[in-house]
Amino acid sequence: MTTQQRKIVLAITACYTLMILYFMLLAFGRTGTVDREAGYTFLFFPLDFFRLPSLSDLLLHPTVMDLVGIGNVAAFIPFGLLIPLLYRISFIRFIALFILSILAIETIQALTMLGSFDLNDVIQNSIGAAIGFGAYKIGFRTTSVRRNIVVTGISVVILLGGVWGSFGIFNKAYVQELGPFVALSELKDSSGNPAMGAKPYSFKVGGQDVEPKHNVYSAGGNNVETYTYSLGNNELYLYFNYGIPDQENLRGSLSISVDGQEYLSVSATDERQEPEISSLYVEQAKELTITIEGNEKVWDVGFREMKYSWNW
């Protein structure tokens, strides 16, 4: 590399570094939120660094978090290309210094309340830098600048695609996702008997037509009715709708408990005159108890269990 080329690369590196620092410390209205922060935020457990969106999701239904995840990797690829161009450095030394630098910036973000210290970001940023370094090692092997740039660009795409695919495999293998919806009426109660609860039928709540798809639970002819089901000690999300049908007295209540702990308790005086749609997260659900009093109705009760892909 000639002296002139080195100066150009150095200028590009400096400008790009300043731009990254601006986005990490000052952009997105960070300075305007300092006074509203309650305190320092340190996230030391990497919850989702492997959760990169699929290509179809990114192209058809991109979300802010999808773009942030990809950006956290892609934005730091240039450092893996530029630093080795300026200095002869081994990968181990490069990635160690890079990680220390990112850790320092993340700490500054938290201590100045301009963001949070997130180990997830450190991992994603470092992966991006590692991809860039690998692409540099593959691409810059000749004296032809044009050829080196082309091969390096292709290498970046291939390495990024490989990491993306690896993360997808890891995600499928080791991360739990929501399983299919299971209606409560498909289960047996805690005594092993077929599930109770009326078959779906239509009614109105607050003038809105309600057409349950799976089940309807009510007190029936009793003042109070209790339904109990075994859920197998699983992590899950419980879904249900409830309300008091029109032309019936606004009298009743609903209680939902899991393993003796009450997760929901509502009465007719607390409810709006419209169907209520609710969901509950339960870390470990062994036994579900639904207690219905008066004219309250609960319908389309079911759950989606958190499962690994091999358990589906």
Image (tube, rainbow, N blue to C red):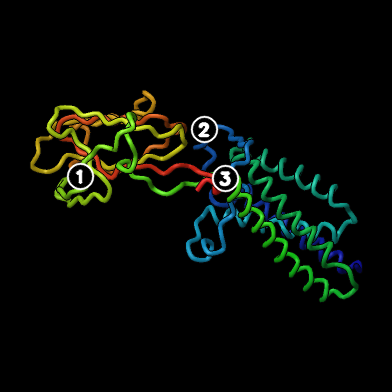
- Residue under the point 64% across and 36% down: 44
In the rendered structure, find residue 274 and report the number of the disc placed on it. Answer: 1
Q: Mark 2 highlights which residue?
A: 38
Label 3 or label 2, whichever lies nearer to me, is 3
In the rendered structure, find residue 175 and report the number of the disc placed on it. Answer: 3
Q: CA distance from mark 2 to mark 1?
A: 37 Å
Label 1 or label 3, whichever lies nearer to me, is 3
In the rendered structure, find residue 256 and report the number of the disc placed on it. Answer: none
Image quarter where the N terminus lies is bottom right
Residue 101 location, x and y as percent? 75, 44
Residue 243 drawn above or below residue 131: above
Report helix, strand or loop for mark 3.
loop
Label 2 or label 1, whichever lies nearer to me, is 1
- Residue under the point 50% across and 48% down: 312
Report helix, strand or loop for mark 2.
loop
Q: Nearer the viewer, residue 30 or 51?
A: 51
The amino acid type found where label 3 is placed reads: Val
Q: Nearer the viewer, residue 187 or 126?
A: 187
The tally of labels here is 3
Q: CA distance from mark 1 to mark 3?
A: 37 Å
